[in-house]
Image (spheres, rainbow, N blue to C red):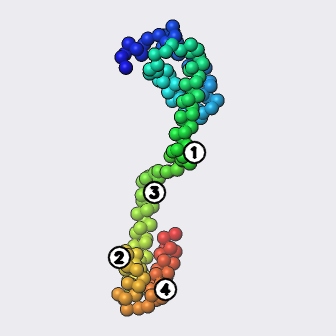
Amino acid sequence: MPIAKLHQNHGGRPVDAVTPLLPAVRRFVSKRAAPAEIDDLVQEVALRMQTRSGDLPIGNLEGYVFQVARSVLTDHARRDQVRARSSHVSLEEFHHPVEVRSPERVLDSKERLQRLVAAVGTLPDRTRQAFVLHRFEEMSYAAVARHMGISVSAVEKHIMKAIRTLAATVD
């Protein structure tokens, strides 16, 4: 479309005649849309009026602008429905808290790790071996049982004993 056509008069009125109607369009849209969407919807109305390609003059500019606004709202509602926007959850900072890595927290974690390592060293040999194979070597209970030559039930008992001992040590 030629640039001159964008600035031509529509029904004896310049395209700039839409600008004074935008506050009324904003009020119209604000009654029918979420506050966060109002600016975008009003801008869409102005854009559609600016890029209108009809050769016929607009007899009732105000009525036409509000018809365009209704059309923009309808299109917006359809897009929301298709995209299931009402099911979306906004990502806020409180949904994903960032833990502060303070020097005190780092020191506390290092001390807890040292206590845990020391506690693993104090476990009975068979219990420590079963725990290390399962937790650190990521072997299943059945694989640990085969490796150690004991039953799966015995492995379960060793693992539970290790967990109880280590939990009491760390706290």
- The mark found on residue 105 in the picture is 3
User: Which badge, 2 or 1, comes first in the chain's sequence?
Assistant: 1
Residue kind at label 2, given as amino acid type? Glu
Quadrant containing the N terminus is top left
Of 54 and 32, the residue lying toward us: 54
Circle 2 sits on which residue?
137
Q: Earlier in the sequence, mark 2 or mark 4?
A: 2
Mark 4: few/some/many CA within 10 Å (<14, 14-19, 20+): few
The residue to which callout 4 is attached is: 157
Q: Secondary structure at mark 4?
A: helix
Q: Residue drawn at (43%, 62%), measured in percent from left and top?
A: 109
Residue 76 appears in the picture as rendered: yes
Q: Earlier in the sequence, mark 1 or mark 3?
A: 1
Q: As rendered, which of 124 and 161 lies closer to the eye?
A: 161
Look at label 1 and name its amino acid.
Answer: Ser
- In the image, residue 12 sits, relative to residue 97, either above or below, namely above
